Image (cartoon, helix red, strand yellow):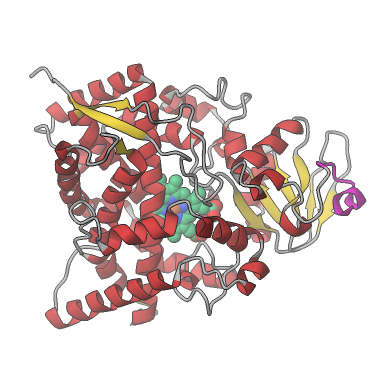
Amino acid sequence: NHWRRCGVDGPVPLPLVGNLLEYILAKKHFGEVYQKVYKSYSSASYVGIYRLLNEPAILVRDLDFVKDVFVRKFNAYHDNSVMIDPKLDPLAMSNPFYAKGDRWKLLRSQLAPLFTSSKVKSLFPLVYDVCQKFEKYVARGPDNQYNAFEAKDLCSKFTIEVMASCGFGLNGEAFTNPNSEFAKFGEQIYSPTFWTFLQSVGGHFLPPVSKILRLPSIPKNIQRWLTIIAKEVIRRRETENGTRNDFLQLISDTKENDKILSENEVLGHCSTLLIEGFETSSTLMAYCLYELAINPDIQKAVHEELDRVLVKHNRTITYESLQEMNYLNSAMLETLRMHPVMSATVKLCTEDTELPPQYPGGRPVTIPAGTSIVVPVMAIQYDPELYPKPNTFNPERFNDENQGSRNKYSFLSFGEGPRICIGMRFGMMQSKAGLATILYKYNVRLSPKTQVPTKPTPATYLLNPESGLWMNFERRLRKL
Ligand code: HEM
């Protein structure tokens, strides 16, 4: 009765599971469940819903309200509606994504200097080295009974290797050693399993239950492993007196009030970058390859751009050449529109706040502090009023002209405002470098094993293709 009493319209909930029955039965990803609600209330600026254990939440529809949440009323909506237990998850305590209030401000300010354009550019040589390994690995061909590469797995190898190198200055051996610690880490933390499903449900919807079940956001053995390698690398750097241009060095050199950060702070930040940095980018890369494989004309246009740009750069991918690949950039943004890695962002309203009327001519409503605010990113990015023919992959939506004429808050794959993804520039750079490396040399074809259209698995918090994205790479014959 909560929303009925407040005079807010919304779907009738079921006991315990609220409006998330299909999610809890693992039939749909929660992003798809929110999309269904979004579509059913087309004239409302928001909808009153219930999440698990019938927690009342507001699902935002109107883009002006979205702007309030991310920017205009940031004071009331600055925290993410996620909770972690410091005892269970000491490393995640350094991740700004989980941090609240002043602690978030501090962590964000410590990380921000790492992501300026010049710092991102300075990391490019390390990314380039990994691109070379990536190319060699693909050239060797798939090594499985399906005679095809699974794109998510393939691209994760690339991004794990990049993060091992750019984060810690280590060789992750993701391409050469199937038992490498880095490869196992990637698999364990993000591959869809019953554990990741429980962790997603517990950590993001039912924090008290996750506390009782003792479900950390990062598995304990991974926390131990990360701590050991980071400490070892920090010690080695101290004794060798070496410097290397990577995240670990940049963080170690960071000063807070003229004091360098403690070893634990450095360790916490490195683990944040490793965890946030690889899965998001590999998901973008894998879905982009999938979309290009099922849209051969668009793939052809990407190839033409690569040939045109790289001929000017000695047929070598450089940081500068990446800046000239505008069409590939648009294809990546269109991929993120259709496959937003975080299909919904959930903020916490931290003070009693007046909302605009739900329907034109209605009256304003005050919601209490503690209410979760769901921004249904996937639903907004599939709204035909914002993106006509939303199921069609069309990179032209992201050329300068079309992007400029659309409401800024209709594209939320990196969030917006003061909490926008801090690693956006680096994530786009590493993904673009990896994609350009492969696409310059190969045509991408889908293997019959791939389900089209692809469906996200409900078992992971971030978007993940349910039955994989299987594909083959055929060497391109380029005219000289
Ligand atoms: C394609 C790649 C990526 C995508 C789609 C992505 C997406 C996102 C999204 C949606 C958020 C939440 C924004 C919000 O709370 O409103 C976020 C936050 C964050 N991302 Fe990314 N991300 C990507 C790459 C990266 C990389 C490469 C790093 C670091 C190396 C990174 C580090 C972070 C951090 C630390 C936060 C928390 C920021 C805060 O709360 O202040 N991300 N990202």
Q: Nearer the viewer, residue 363 or 246?
A: 246
Residue 206 colored magenta? no
Q: What is the tally of numbered marks visible in this picture? A: 0
Residue 299 on image: x %, y %: 31, 23
Seen from the viewer's position, the closer of residues 478 and 151 is 151
- Residue found at x 25% / y 37%: 322
Residue 196 drawn above or below residue 254? above
Report the residue at 49% width, 45% height from top: 463
**Residue at image x 67%, y 70%?**
208
Residue 422 appearing in the image? no
Q: Is residue 169 visible?
A: yes
At 18% across and 37% down in the image, what residue appears?
141
**239 up-or-down from 467: above or below:** below
| Quadrant of the drawing holding the C terminus | top left
Task: Tell me which corner region of the image, top left, top right, bottom left or bottom right, holds residue 394.
Answer: top left
Residue 231 x, y percent position in the rendering: 28, 78
Residue 54 is left or right of residue 343, and the answer is right
Range drawn in magenta: 1-11
Residue closer to the observer: 286 or 448:
448
- Name, please, the residue furthest toward the right: 5
What residue occupies the far front of the structure in this picture? 145
Which sits in the foreground, 384 or 439?
A: 439
Q: In the figure, is residue 204 to the left or right of 287?
A: right
Residue 330 on image: x %, y %:
39, 30
